[in-house]
Amino acid sequence: MPSPSRFPLMALAALALAAPAAADDSMDCSGGIVRVGDAKIDLLGKCGPPALQEVLDRDRASLQRFGAAGPGPRVSTTVERWTYNYGPTRFLQFVTIEAGKVVSITRGSYGYSLDAPPKAPPIPRARCDASVLKTGLGTFDVLTLCGEPAFQDVRLEVWGASEVVVEVWTYDFGPTAFVRFLKFVEGKLRRIETGSYGYSR
């Protein structure tokens, strides 16, 4: 019988998912602690690339509510699961990401001895200054000014009979500046949110 180190990665993931798992709200990595609610760029910056990255469902819809206002939009978004394997002395970690945010962290069985994973590709740094970002800019304007974002998450929101395409672009301005999350609605920049310090070098 082959040793676990020779099993294909997908087979190992299937075995791990079959084992009992425990929910958690944080994960301790070499670059710091990642918690539920953190952005995907924080997960990559602190924990590096996963051993396995899966897209679970591109059309998962959820009904969101906002206070007493009643039902909000029906949202179709991408759900990902990142599996981290730290070897046979530590537990596997399964991180679920929805719309660019960590929504759950689950601990699995002990990990496996595998060949060292490839080094994480560098997180791209925005080629502009954050001060050039203004609401009202179009996606092409921002792309021309700042280059490709580190991450681009797209979802479809349905309000009544209208469908609205919402994109969130993540830009990293380096370790001395804050990450920016740009929310575009139908190609126009509607909101700019600030995250943690950046990770690009």
Image (spheres, rainbow, N blue to C red):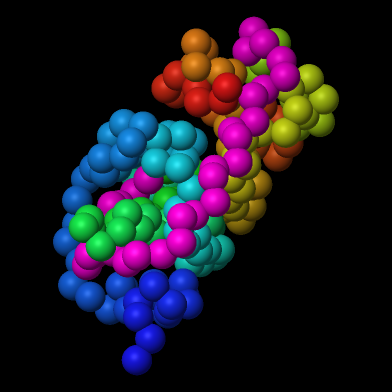
Image point 64% across, 31% down: which residue?
Answer: 124
Question: Does residue 138 appear to the left or right of 32 in the view shown?
Answer: right
x and y percentages locating residue 23 in the rendered image? 19, 57
Image quadrant where one finds the N terminus: bottom left
Residue 69 vs residue 178, the one in the foreground: 178
Which of 183/175 is in front?
Answer: 175
Read off the magenta span: 102-131
Q: Nearer the viewer, residue 52 or 195?
A: 52
Which residue occupies the extreme bottom position in the image?
1
What residue do we see at 59% from left, 33% from top? 123
Residue 91: quadrant of the picture: bottom left
| Residue 150 in which image quadrant | top right
Image height of 77 relative to 56, above or below: above
Q: In x, y percent, where is residue 44?
A: 47, 40
Q: Main secondary structure of the magenta part?
A: loop
- Using the image as rendered, state which of residue 24 and residue 200 is in the foreground: 200
Q: Identify whether 88 is placed above or below 69.
A: below
- On the question of residue 35 being in view, the answer is no
At 19% from the left and 51% from the top, the residue drawn is: 24
Does 200 lie within the magenta span? no
Work out whether residue 21 can be spotted: yes
Image quarter (top left, top right, bottom left or bottom right) of the C terminus: top right
Where is residue 38? Give x, y as percent.
37, 36
In x, y percent, where is residue 102?
A: 37, 45
